[in-house]
């Protein structure tokens, strides 16, 4: 699964990188599920580059409905785009955004690495 949202010179990418609630996805653990990772990028000098401290695993399962994935990307974009364009750190915002999708449908409430 791969989804991109572009607005001007900022891009939010949601990807399946085989991550789960406790690190690498473990299909043998019935409490684990594959989750999407987001990355914020900026277009500079004719190429896309990663924004510092802007790549985090979410609480959004890879098999989420497309509209949920689009909503998550739009929320992330809304929260980070002005700061990215102004050259301001988005680390703290991205840390908070890592919980996108985590509480939908009363999902996983166990301690996980998302709050670290």
Image (spheres, helix red, strand yellow):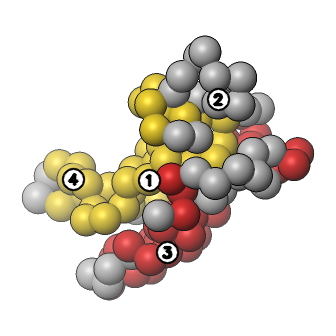
Tell which circle, 1 or 4, labels the residue nearer the N-terminal end.
Answer: 4
Q: Residues within 10 Å of mark 2 (few under 14, many from 20)?
A: many
Looking at the rendered structure, which numbered label has been put on residue 33? 2
Q: CA distance from mark 3 to mark 1?
A: 11 Å
Which residue occupies 76% across, 40% down?
67
Work out which quarter of the rendered image holds the N terminus and state it: top right
Q: Earlier in the sequence, mark 3 or mark 4?
A: 4
Q: Residue furthest top?
A: 28
Q: Is residue 86 above or below residue 96?
A: below
Q: Earlier in the sequence, mark 4 or mark 2?
A: 2
Look at the image and tell me whether residue 94 can be seen.
yes
Would you say the residues marked 3 and 4 are in contact, meaning their CB atoms lie under 8 Å apart? no
Q: CA distance from mark 2 to mark 1?
A: 16 Å
Which dot, 2 or 3, sits closer to the camera?
2
Of circles 1 and 4, which is in front?
1
Locate residue 105, reporting x and y percent: 88, 45
Q: Quadrant of residue 65?
A: top right
Instruction: Write down the residue under mark 1.
Output: 56
| Mark earlier in primary sequence (2, 1) | 2
Which numbered disc flags the more N-terminal residue, 2 or 3? 2
Q: Which mark is residue 49?
A: 4
Q: Dot 1: within a 10 Å radius of its alpha carbon, few (fewer than 14), some, or many (20 or more) residues?
A: many
Residue closer to the observer: 30 or 3? 30
Residue 42 in view: no
Give the labeled residue for mark 3: 93
Instruction: Estimate the x, y position of residue 82 in percent, counting from the top left.
Output: 44, 79
């Amino acid at each position: 699964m791969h989804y991109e949202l572009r607005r001007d010179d900022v891009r939010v990418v949601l990807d399946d990188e085989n991550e789960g609630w406790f690190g690498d996805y473990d299909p043998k653990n019935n409490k684990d599920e594959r989750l999407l990772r987001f990355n914020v990028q900026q277009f500079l000098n004719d190429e896309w580059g990663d924004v510092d401290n802007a790549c985090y695993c979410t609480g959004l399962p890879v098999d989420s409905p497309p509209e949920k994935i689009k909503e998550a990307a739009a929320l992330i974009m809304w929260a980070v785009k002005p700061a990215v364009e102004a050259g301001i750190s988005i680390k703290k915002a991205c840390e908070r955004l890592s919980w996108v999708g985590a509480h939908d449908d009363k999902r996983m409430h166990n301690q996980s690495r998302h709050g670290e």
